[in-house]
Image (cartoon, rainbow, N blue to C red):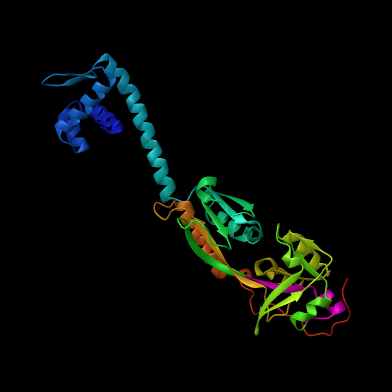
Amino acid sequence: MDRITSMTAFATVVAAGSFAGAAQRLQMSPAMVTNHVRALEERLGARLLNRTTRKVSLTEAGRDYHERCTQILAQIEAADSRVSALTSAPRGTLRVNASTVLSHGLATLVGDFGATYPEITVELIATDRMVDPVEEGFDLAIRYNEAPDSSLIVRRLGQFRVVACAAPAYLEKYGVPLRPADLTQHNCLAYMHPGFTKLTREWTLIGPEGEVTVPISGSFHTNSLDAIRHAVVEGRGITMSQTYHLEEAMRCGQLVHVLPDYHLGEYPVYAIYPHREHMPAKLRSFIDFAVKHFAEHAKWRLPESVPSALPRPLVRRAG
């Protein structure tokens, strides 16, 4: 028999003062209650209750066992209540993994979520490698590529593009590229993903006629999005970067959209998590909040109001 059920039956008999009273409280038959208590006594090798026709009383061993038994059952009840509370109300610590590139764009999402759900602490961990949420203890991962493990749940949150931009001062000095081939005459500031340096040598752009690959070169390569943005705002060259990383600088005029009919790719953003059933309230709340965030925030899609560079002739190769 289940030991916890037997302990519950024993404690209820003591509280009710009889097997019949315990059976009524537990919605069991008196015979079943008797069997549970007997199973405990056989397991322990000790009599717990003295039984008479009118009442039951605790033996010396029964008193000691009852004291410890009630403590254990109270702890189990507290544990159940705590888990139920975590499942029904959004609170606790939410561990989120994101690719290093995406983590730069999630600050607003995490901040707004924290303000809405102050009882949830978000731990955002950025890694370039795909993690296993179950093995590594994450509630979910936010990635732009789907998980290789088909047992994980994948929900699309939104998407972003990688587009070209430059500072007005740079374009004033060196001219505006009117077609992808013009990029060969410019200083191209390239994001350098660890173990993948192709983007420092060529950009494959998607445009009205399909894909076109352009050889590029430049004086600065980095795996830091912040460093890329700082360099391009300073007027050091043209870069390709994510819409969510550029939108604010474009909106305020620090950067302008270059080659607006072309982009380096459009990438979906996914929430990846282990289980759909019995989902904790903190996770359910975050996913719902993230879906709304991606739909409402312009930085995940470059709006039409962002200015594009006006055509100007190329002057010379920028150093």
Q: Image quadrant for the C terminus?
A: bottom right
Confirm whether the magenta stretch covers residue 113: no
- Position of 85 with respect to 121 (left or right) is left
Residue 232 visible within the image: yes
Residue occupying the point 42% across, 41% down: 82
Q: Is residue 214 above or below residue 58?
A: below
Residue 4 screen position, x and y as percent: 30, 32
Confirm whether the magenta stretch covers residue 174: yes
User: Which contiguous range is marked in magenta?
Assistant: 161-177
- Pick the residue in front: 254 or 32: 32
Residue 256 visible within the image: no
Residue 1 screen position, x and y as percent: 25, 32
The quarter holding residue 257 reads bottom right
Residue occupying the point 51% across, 65% down: 156
Residue occupying the point 15% across, 21% down: 55
Residue occupying the point 26% across, 25% down: 40
Farthest residue in the top direction?
A: 60
The quarter holding residue 302 reads bottom right
The quarter holding residue 45 reads top left
- Pick the residue in front: 246 or 63: 246
Tell me how many marks there are.
0
- Position of 248 with respect to 28 (left or right) is right
- Pick the residue in front: 29 or 143: 143
Residue 34 screen position, x and y as percent: 18, 28
Q: Is residue 262 above or below residue 273?
A: below
- Pick the residue in front: 63 or 270: 270
Residue 149 screen position, x and y as percent: 49, 56
